[in-house]
Every structure is written in C-alpha cells, then in structure tokens.
Amino acid sequence: MMRPSWLAPAAPPASAAVRRPTGASARGSARAAFPGFRPFTLESEELVRPQPRAPTQPTPAAPTHPDDASPPVPTAASAAGADDAATTNPGSASEGPRRLLSSQDQMALRWGCSAGAVLLRQAVDSGALRGALAEALAALPGFAGRLVLREDGGMFDLGCTDEGARLLEGRTDSVSVQQVLDEMAAAPYSAAGLWDPWPELSLPPGPEAIAQQRLPLASVLLLRLSCGGCLLALSAYHAVADFEALQTFAAHLAAAYNARLRSPQQREGAAARAGVEVPTAGRGEEQAGLTPRARGSDDGGGSNAAPPLTAPPPDRLGARFEPTAVEALAAPGPPPPGVPPRSLDSMSHLRAAWPLPPGLAARVVAARAAYHGRYRGGGVEGRLLTVPAERLAALKARAVAELAEERARDGPGGELAGVDWVSTNDALAARLLQLLHALPLRRARPMHAFLAANMRRRLQPPLPRALLGNALGAALLEGMRPAELSLGRLAGLLRRELAERTAAHYQMSVHQVGSVVRQYGSSGLMMSMALSPGDVTRCNLAPEGPVVLVHWDVDHGLWQFGPERPLAFLPLSGTPANTVRYLASPGGGGVALGVWLHRLAWAQLDEATGGDLAAAL
C-alpha cells in the first residue's frame, strides 16, 4: 500500500541537510556542525487499535515478549475494513444528537496538532510501547477515533471508531543523545527545525481532508539515536487535545509502558530487544528500581533517576470529552463590571466575512498568509533557548520592585490596585513583550498580546483536569506600548488580566463561538484576526500582528518512559509565527523557551540583542 504523500518523510534538499543556526548560535566555528535528526530512516509504520490489557496473571518463567497477552495489532494496510465499525461504535457520528467535540474544540480545527517530544537517555522497547499504546487507546478511545462531519448542522465531530493511532519507528545514525545535549548547552539558541523530525509526519492543515481521508488523529514516533537513547514524540489533532489533554494521553501511555516493564523477566526481554545491558549486581538492584543501562550511555540511573508511574495519577483518570459542561459556561454578555469588552480573539466564518464561493474564499486566505508570511516576513523561523534560573530570579525581583513603585505612584484606585504580586512567568512574558515591541517593525504602533491560559482550574466550578479536548482562554493586552512601560507595570497588567478578567472573557468566547458554529457550521470557521483587513497589528498573519505567549505546564513525570526522567522536552513543529512557548526545564532551575517569528523580526532582534536573546532578557 502506497503511503500518502503527506506521511512520507521528504528528504531535505542538500543545502538543508546540515542547517546552521543564525545569530550567536552560529559562533564557535571550531565546533562541528550538529547534523540534526533529519533525514532519518523510517523503519516501520503501523496502526495500533485499542486493546485493554489482559487481567494480571502469574508471570511465566521465561516470557518472550512484554505484551504477550495482547493480540496481533493490525497494520495500516489492514485498516480498510474499519469503516464498518464506524456505523455501530458508541460515539460515532451516526448516533445523531450525541456530540464529543465542544464549540471550543471547533475553534481548534485549523490549529494543527498538539505535539511534544522527550529526549530519553535509555532505550524504549518497541514491543512494550506498542502494547502500552493499545492499552492507552482503550482507556482514551477518542485518540483512536476519526474526524467526521455530522449531518445535523454541518459540524465536525469525533467518532470513537476504534480505527487506531499511528505508531512509527525510525532510526538515525548521525546523532547521539550526548550530541543533542552538547548542542543545547553550547549555544544561546538554535534553529528549532534542527531538532524536529516531525513536519513530514504531521496531518494536513484542514479538517476537510482529515475527515475525508479518515486519517489517524494521534501518532507516536519512536526515533532511536546513535549509541543508545531515543526521541519519543507524541502528537494529537488539536481539536481532540490541547496541551493539557495531550499530557493526559502521555500519562496513560507512560504508565502502561512502565507497568509492562515492572518484572525482572519482562525487563530482561525488553533489554535484549532494545540493545541495552542489565546491571549484574543482583536481583536486589532490579527490585529497587535500578535500570537497564543503554550501551554508550554514561550511567544507568544517574542523577535523573526517579520512580516511574505505573498507573495514571488520580486526577488523570476518568478522562473524557464533556461538551455539555463546557458549553454550559457560555455567557452572552455584556461583560461584568470592571471587565472591558474585546473582539480581537473572536471567531468568524468565511461565509460571513467574505460572501465568496467557499473555494475562492479559502484561496484568498491562503494568498494573504503567503503575502504576509513569505513576501513581507521572509518566512517563519523557530529558535530554542534556555533562560537560567538566576536570570529568571533577577527578572522577577526587578518586576516586583517596580510593581511596588508603580502602585505607590498611582495611589489608591489605580489600574494596578489589587495586584500585589507577580509570578516569574509574568515577569518573563513582560520582558519578552518589551523586546519585541522595541523592534523597528513594531515600535511606532500599539501592540496586542495574548497570554494563553488553561482554563480547567480557573473557572468556578472548575473543569476536571482530565477533561479532553480544549479549554484554552487567554489574557489580552490590547493596544499597549510595552517598550514604553516599566517591567513591573507590564507584569502587573498581565497578572490583573489573568486573575480578574480571563474567566469572564472565556465564558463570553464560549457563547460567541457557539453562536457562529450554530449559524454557519464549523467548516470555514476561522479566527477573525486571520480575516482582518487593513490594520496589520490586528492580523495574526503579519509580522506586526498579535503576539501569543503560551506557558506549557509540563509535568515531566507524566512523560517518563522507564526509570529516568526526560533529559529535555522539545516542542514540535507547526507553531505559527508570533508565538512564544515556555516551559520549565526537566531538571528545574531554568526555563526552556521556544520563539517563532518571521525572519524579518529575527533580523531586527538579532541586531538589537547581539544575537543573544537569552542574555537580553
């Protein structure tokens, strides 16, 4: 069976085989260029269907495989008959009124995938991973489903058809775990494309193609590295999972994997297949949780060792889609006293914005994206950097001191009244906005900035932490001039928006999006910012457009496959321009930062910072 063109890894052009970072990371020419993960050899691809693990039985004397209890898993080529199951499986579109995707999930239909990868020192056994994926899909069947277009209203929905998720295995002989760690430590920042093997394996951009081709909505990629260790990547269609929901999927997958390696016999079998050595000091060490050691690694457990989860945490159990609970939060407005209205983050529909034939309207949007992104902006580049703990502490101390000064200057009743603290994240976000607004392409005009927020725990009553789908709100600083404000005032304004206004705006957004979807359906649903004519500061496609800051609250323990915590967590591709993601480093003590900007903006930022954004913070 021929692999679809969107799935086959494309060999990069010769000029891209070794891609050098720009700015400060290009210094030190004596150091050999890091070859990157691409191109890599894709060794296998299969479709894994849900399969609950068999009840625990006495361990046989010499098991041959850690998931012997699991039946053979069908491959992608044998999935052609899966359509028959779609008409009878609970949760399929044929059931009529029952829905799984909320109006907030409809917003994310064109947002690509939620995706992340962990760099692991130890090998991962493919047999155990395959069985764990089948078990995780049985607990979270939506990740094994397919996108469908309902007949009752033109809305896309999720059919829990049990057609499976993709499991892909690859290998690269050009890079080792230590090379990756050395490269990350050696440069202030590096091109994000250097790390990411995922782009050629992602989904098409539009929901129509995903539904028509019945494409898998979740994927797991195991990429083995030279000398042991691996990169393990998880991806899920954004309409099915925001980052917090992706972490729930990771928790179930990791726990199922770790549970399969608990017994000494299972671990020996996994070690033999993965090419690792089991410590020989005796069974007592294995019972205590010491690990098989990868050939070529410097230690087995190391300082990164930690007891792995063998069951999902209690707050990740019972994961489900709850569109009714989400949409019950809808508030038509007007906003409560003290909360100003806003429209920058509203949703629109192509038919409402531009009364053109659907195909023509979509081509107009694509042309505008190309004009702003490639012609004006020079394309999009992502870079990764690490901000050390001491720099973060100094940044927060400065913001706290300046906040106190600003509040004293304003007196009672000022715009910062009630804001008596700011977080490290507030200070970091504020400093980033100052630097970006100071660029020549932005500084003559006001700037708009969103600070994305997971709304599950910010609402009253709160939504379950294990809620699947999307529960994303955002604080908004609209029409600000960050470069002209003190760090303390800007951080305080962000804190005020998060604490006092974000919940109300989220509830109004639920109402507004639901109204548009009910009137027009969800095919053609788009952010109003993408359709905004004229003002480039309000167009999210433009280099001057709104900046989106996203804090990923990564729980590295949920991403632990085996006895060691991940060495690094890497955001994957598909991130749009004007986006900043930041997350705590696995070992603590710093923040990993991913910044995606147009190359026009990077050129100006490199000139302003001397090529060292981390130092400029």
Image (tube, rainbow, N blue to C red):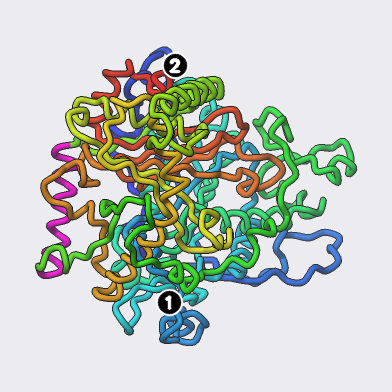
327, above or below 45, in the image: below
Read off the residue under disc 2. 31
* The image quarter in which residue 576 lies: top left
**Where's residue 230, x and y in %?**
57, 41
Q: Is residue 209 visible?
A: yes
Tell me the quadrant of the picture where the C terminus can be found: top left
Asked whether 219 or 7 is in front, the reply is 219
Read off the residue under disc 1. 80
Q: Main SS type for the magenta part?
A: helix
Residue type at the position of mark 2: Arg
Asked whether 87 falls inside the magenta stretch, the response is no
Asked whether 432 or 70 is in front, the reply is 432
Left-right relation of 360 to 62: left
| Highlighted magenta segment, given as a residue range | 356-376
**Where's residue 616, x and y in %?**
39, 19
Asked whether 364 falls inside the magenta stretch, the response is yes
Q: Earlier in the sequence, mark 1 or mark 2?
A: 2
Left-right relation of 178 to 192: right
